[in-house]
Image (spheres, rainbow, N blue to C red):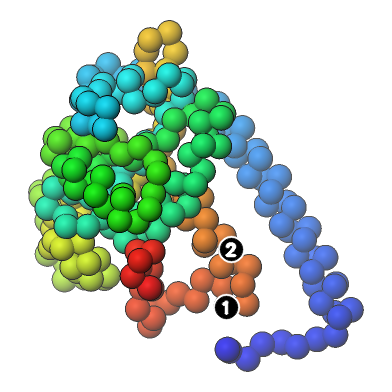
């Protein structure tokens, strides 16, 4: 444990009160951002997509499963992967348990990946998840249209840069190479179904996905915080690999 300031109870209470004011301001700011998020214009989806699911082949409107709102997490699990992305997998441990609560609020949550459905379902069973998972059957159109798939040409500058960071390690842990690993991207895309028409309402990626990684918010309140740095190997594993 690194050295840290030690004070009296009174000093702690004063510092905590000051921090609490900033935490409250952040909460209020987040409330305002939520309002702005809900006010984003909707985009009508004209294109038709097809998915392989446990209930057979389905269209995008059918993925709503009788509800009016649909959240799709583009889970990084490409056709060449032997196992899903470890970071995506850590997030699944959070939202798998949240699905019944989302359903109660007229929201269907599903993951979508390009790997074959049988491989996705076997992986889901291995890690004990409950959420629905659909496959695009290797077709890249859906993921590409919503920013969750990269072509070889798009990846070429990055792959030739020689600065791949943790990508080779993650690729190896998925049973693939850096190029095929990076063809997939984690994205949350949100849709609404209104009078038979589907609309895209929201999308986020990168750190915008942190609400799906709820353990980070918990770690932020621990004495060491996230305890991550360039000098520390990336720690996240699948829940049966620690």
Q: What residue did someone put label 2 on? A: 218
Q: Is residue 226 above or below residue 47?
A: below
Q: Is residue 219 above or below residue 121?
A: below
Residue 183 visible in this rendered orientation of the protein: yes
Quarter of the figure with residue 29? top right
Rendering coords of residue 230 (x, y %): 37, 78
| Residue lying at the far top of the rendered structure | 195
Which of discs 1 and 2 lies nearer the camera? The answer is: 2
**Position of residue 162 in the picture relative to residue 221 (left or right):** left
Toward the viewer: 231 or 238? Answer: 238
| Residue lying at the far bottom of the rendered structure | 3
Q: Earlier in the sequence, mark 1 or mark 2?
A: 2
Residue 38 visible in this rendered orientation of the protein: no
Q: Residue at x 39, y 23 (%)?
A: 65
Q: What residue did someone put label 1 on? A: 224
Distance Cα–Cα, label 1 vs label 2: 11 Å
Q: Secondary structure at mark 2?
A: helix
**Position of residue 217 in the picture relative to residue 159 (left or right):** right
Mark 2 is surrounded, within 10 Å at the Cα level, by few (under 14), some (14 to 19) or many (20 or more) other residues, namely few
Toward the viewer: 93 or 78? Answer: 93
Q: Residue at x 77, y 61 (%)?
A: 20
Quarter of the figure with residue 42? top left
């Amino acid at each position: 444990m690194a050295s840290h300031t030690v004070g009296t109870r009174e000093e702690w209470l004063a510092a905590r009160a000051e921090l609490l004011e900033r935490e409250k301001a952040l909460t209020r700011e987040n409330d305002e951002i939520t309002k702005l998020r809900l006010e984003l214009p909707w985009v009508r989806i004209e294109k038709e997509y097809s998915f392989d699911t446990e209930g057979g082949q389905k269209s995008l409107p059918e993925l709503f499963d009788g509800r009016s709102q649909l959240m799709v997490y583009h889970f990084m699990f490409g056709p060449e992967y032997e196992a899903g992305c470890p970071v995506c997998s850590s997030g699944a441990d959070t939202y798998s348990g949240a699905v019944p609560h989302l359903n109660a609020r007229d929201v269907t949550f599903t993951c979508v990946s390009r790997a074959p459905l049988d491989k996705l379902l076997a992986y889901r069973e291995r890690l004990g998840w409950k959420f629905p998972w659909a496959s695009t059957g290797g077709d890249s159109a859906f993921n590409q249209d919503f920013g969750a798939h990269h072509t070889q040409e798009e990846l070429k500058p990055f792959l030739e840069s020689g600065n791949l960071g943790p990508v080779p390690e993650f690729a190896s842990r998925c049973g693939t190479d850096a190029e095929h690993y990076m063809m997939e991207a984690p994205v949350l895309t949100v849709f609404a179904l209104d009078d038979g028409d589907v609309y895209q309402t929201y999308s986020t990626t990168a750190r915008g996905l942190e609400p799906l990684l709820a353990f980070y918010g918990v770690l932020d309140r621990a004495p060491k915080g996230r305890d991550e740095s360039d000098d520390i190997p990336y720690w996240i594993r699948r829940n049966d690999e620690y």
